[in-house]
Image (cartoon, helix red, strand yellow):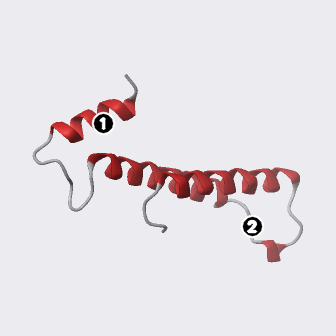
Amino acid sequence: MSARDDILAGLRASEGTAIGDASPEEVLDRYRAEVLREAADAIAAPVPPVEAGPRTERERGRMEAVAELRRMADEAGGPRA
């Protein structure tokens, strides 16, 4: 069983079948999206803005990783920050 399955089982076992207006699956998907966006923000933080000049290969790689994490977050669902 994965950590996701364990959390989902716990949410399902809690009082009621929904948290607010969301199902346990929706809550878990929104949490995953939030974690992915936090990871993207942490990776992007040390990269200077484009206006600071040309980016190094490492900075470009970091921004590619940020874009991929944000794409995954969008697929997972949940509101954008």
Label 2 sits on residue: 48
Dot 1: within a 10 Å radius of its alpha carbon, few (fewer than 14), some, or many (20 or more) residues? Answer: some
Above or below, 24 relative to 13: below
Residue 19 x, y percent position in the rendering: 21, 55
Q: Any mark on residue 19, and which?
A: none
Mark 1 and mark 2: span between their CA atoms?
37 Å
Amino acid type of disc 2?
Pro
Horizontal relation, residue 54 to residue 41: left or right: right
Towards the viewer: 56 or 18: 18
SS of the residue under disc 2: loop
In this view, the residue farthest toward the left is: 15
Amino acid type of disc 1?
Ile
Label 1 sits on residue: 7
Residue drawn at x 16%, y 36% as measured from the top left:
13
Residue 31 x, y percent position in the rendering: 39, 51
Residue drawn at x 81%, y 77% as measured from the top left:
51
